[in-house]
Amino acid sequence: LRKRLWLMAQKMLGNYDDVTWHASTEQEAEEIRNWFPQARILTALNLPVPFDPQPTPTSDDPNLTLLSVGRVHPIKNYLHGVHVANALADSGLKICYRIVGPIEDRDEAARLKQAAQGITLEFSGPVDPPEVKQHFAKAHLVLVPSLNENFGHAVAEAIAHGRPVLVSDQTVWSTMKPGPSVSCLQLNVTDWVESARNLLRMDHDTLVDHSQEAYHSCLRDTQHLAAQRRLFKS
């Protein structure tokens, strides 16, 4: 409600009439137009972090680490991630599900703790951007079960660090072709568990090769780089 009132005030006062907007995707551009119909918008994916694949985690405790990166809020749908982690644990795996990001909704955090059964659920809190890499390095699989994402930076960072990703079909990634290291799925626990097992069976060299292909085809292709240059020439 506070955000909506603030946006309404800015629209009435015309404070953003002379602003040029940068949208990561067409979906984000449309959301800007919903509030500022006459807005001047340039669309370009955010540039990713450098491609820097990490070695396979060697720690035996826990046997399997799942990672989500982002604020703890119902829109991120980490409850689905907990259900997936629970199902994997039911098959005999020792699971740690780590969520890195600020807790914006404490009620949601409480729901996640209550739902976690037979797994270790960790809230690591917010970290500085350079420190996020170490969390990807310790993870075996990245989960992005969000109900709505304009882009999905966690997916891009997972690819850059050579980690397999399960992502909901509510993001722009469902319109891309990231290859075998990224599975874009409807929010069905059974499908996610099956896909998780397939991704986890992928050997490290194959995973890195697929991640590198996804990095260059989805994040650093000539079309995206040209769109980035237009941002600075406008």
Image (cartoon, rainbow, N blue to C red):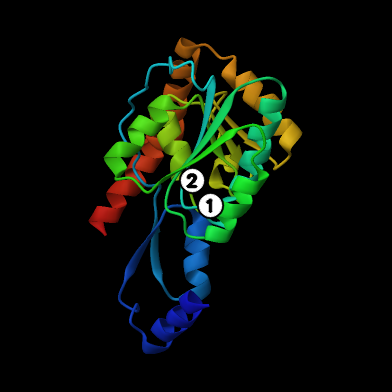
Q: Are marks 2 and 1 in contact (CB under 8 Å)?
A: yes
Mark 2 neighbour density, 10 Å: few (under 14) some (14–19) many (20 or more): many
Instruction: Count the marks.
Output: 2
Q: Amino acid at mark 1?
A: Glu
Q: Residue 62, how many percent across, how many down? A: 51, 22
Q: Secondary structure at mark 2?
A: loop
Name the residue that disc number 1 marks.
149
Instruction: Give, as a three-letter code, the residue at label 2.
Output: Gly
With respect to residue 2, does 62 lie above or below?
A: above
Cα–Cα span, label 2 and label 1: 6 Å
Residue closest to the eye, 144 or 179? 144
Q: Residues within 10 Å of mark 1 (few under 14, many from 20)?
A: some
> Residue placed at 58% from the left, 48% from the top?
146
**Furthest-left residue in view?**
233
**Residue 200 screen position, x and y as percent:** 58, 19
Q: Residue at x 73, y 39 (%)?
A: 188
Residue appearing at x 53%, y 72% in the figure: 34
Residue depicted at x 65% and y 32%: 118
**Residue designated by label 2:** 152
Q: Is residue 148 visible?
A: no
